[in-house]
Every structure is written in C-alpha cells, then in structure tokens.
Amino acid sequence: MACFVAPVTEAVVTTVMAKVVKSKENKEALKNVHMEESSFNNKKIAFSTKLGWLNKMLWGGSALLAFEHIWHGEVIATFPFLTAIKSGEAIGMLKEIGTTGVGMAVLVTAVWGVMLIVSSALEKRAANEVNLAKETN
Amino acid sequence: MTLLIAVFAAIASTIAWYLSLEKKSELQLGFLSLMFWGASLMWFVDAVVEYIEEGAEYFNQAPFDMLNDAYLGLVVVALGMVIWLVSLIIKDPKGLIKSRLIGSRK
C-alpha cells in the first residue's frame, strides 16, 4: 500500500545527518591541516561517506519500490495520492507501514551496520600493514 | 520474480563495480549497486511478509502474475539504470561534459 514511506522517512533523517557530519568533518579537516595529523587518519573512510552508502540504499530502494506501487495502482497522481486513503483503508495502510515498512528500514540499516563492521575491519588491517611496513623499514 | 530480477541486477552491478575499482573508473557503479541492493532488501521483506501470510501458496503463482512481475522487474532495472545515468551526467565526475561544452563555445 505505502510501505516505502518508512524507508523514505529514515532516508530524510540520514540525509540531514550526513550533511551535518560532512560539515563537521570539513571543519576537522581544516584543523588537521594545521596540526599535521598522521597520514593513517587521512586514509580512513569518512563517516559521512559511510552514511552516504545508507542514503543510497534507502533513497534508491524507496524510489524503485515507489515505482512498483505506481505500477500496481497503489500510488496515484491526484490527491490524496494513495488509493488506500481514497478507499478508506487508512488504518490497514498505517499497519503495513508500521510492520513491512519498518521491517524494510530495519533490514537495510542492519545490512549497512554489517558493511560498517567489515569496512572498519579492513581499515584496521590496512593500518596494521602500514605500521608493520614502517617497523621493518 | 521482481525480487529475483532485482537481486540479479544487484549482483551484476556489484561485480561491475568491483571490476571498475581496478581501472579506477569514475562511473559511480557503487551507487547503482547500492540502489539495487536497497530495493532487493526491501522486496525481500515484502516477500517474507507475504510468505508468512500465504504460506507455501506464495511460491505457486499464476503464470500471468509471474509474467507481470517479471515485466515489472525488467522495467525497474531499466528505471534504476536511468536514475544512475542521469546522476552520472549531472555529477560528471571527470568533467568531460563540462570541458566539451566549454570547448564547443570556444
């Protein structure tokens, strides 16, 4: 009916978060230029980039899912835009957003969490290799 | 069928993204693969909910429904690729379109 509403809502929040984090990182980067931080910190993937992965999954997935709803006639071009509201099934629609929609948002976020764990493990391994190379030299 | 086609598109685009890393390509295939993975995960949840409601009947779809779902899956893949292409042209990471436009003005 309108399950894509839940991931879209999360996408709006994470997009705002990514913008805020990005501006903070830019300020930090300016500070680090003066302080000459170690080269390892510069090789780490910025958290705003990692948030970007979640944004792309949420926005992209929601866009394709919204198209599926248009295909099935559940989303229409005229007000109230959702056939469920027009036919008086608003409660059923809200229930679906609360169950299927939230489930979608949670699963995408969980997969992103796994991506974060894997990427931080790879970053640690790369840092160890750099340290080992420095020690041997 | 829509889920299956979206998963295949996600796998293919991820392989293309991985191969593009070696060539240092700026085609932004990561965006395409993340979009298809996002959609695949969402349709997976949809499929699980339908399976809980319908049970084994979920796998016994009528041929016409399967054909319609497959058609939808292909259209969704095409739409995803159009979104990626438009994003690539707007961002123009290598500045090729910009340089061509400026070059043609000169």
Image (cartoon, coloured by chain):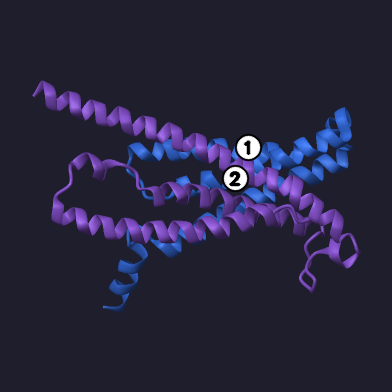
Chain colours: A purple, B blue
Mark yes or no: residue A5 visible.
Answer: yes
**Amino acid at pointer 2:** Gly
User: Can you name the residue that lies furthest to the top here?
Assistant: A136
Q: Nearer the viewer, residue A4 or B64?
A: A4
Q: Are marks 2 and 1 on the same chain?
A: yes
The quarter holding residue A25 reads: bottom left
User: Can you name the residue that lies furthest to the left here?
Assistant: A137
What residue is drawn where x is 46% and y is 45%?
A: B30
Q: Nearer the viewer, residue B35 or A101?
A: A101
Which mark, by number, is residue B7? Answer: 1
Circle count: 2
What residue is drawn where x is 32% and y is 43%?
A: B24
- Decide: marks 2, 1 in contact (CB < 8 A)? no
| Above or below: residue A113 compared with residue A132 | below
Foreground label between 2 and 1: 2
| Above or below: residue A100 compared with residue A114 | below
Helix, strand or loop under label 1: helix
**Amino acid at pointer 1:** Val
**Disc 2 versus disc 1: distance between alpha carbons?**
10 Å
Q: Earlier in the sequence, mark 2 or mark 1?
A: 1
Residue B37 lies, in percent from the top left, at 58, 42
Residue A21 lies, in percent from the top left, at 40, 56
Q: Chain of mark 2?
A: B
User: Quick one: quadrant of the C terminus of chain A?
Assistant: top left
Which mark, by number, is residue B35? Answer: none
User: Quick one: quadrant of the N terminus of chain A?
Assistant: bottom right
Callout 2 crowding tier (Cα within 10 Å): few <14, some 14–19, many ≥20: many
What residue is drawn where x is 43% and y is 46%?
A: A50
Which mark, by number, is residue B38? Answer: 2
Residue B44 lies, in percent from the top left, at 70, 38
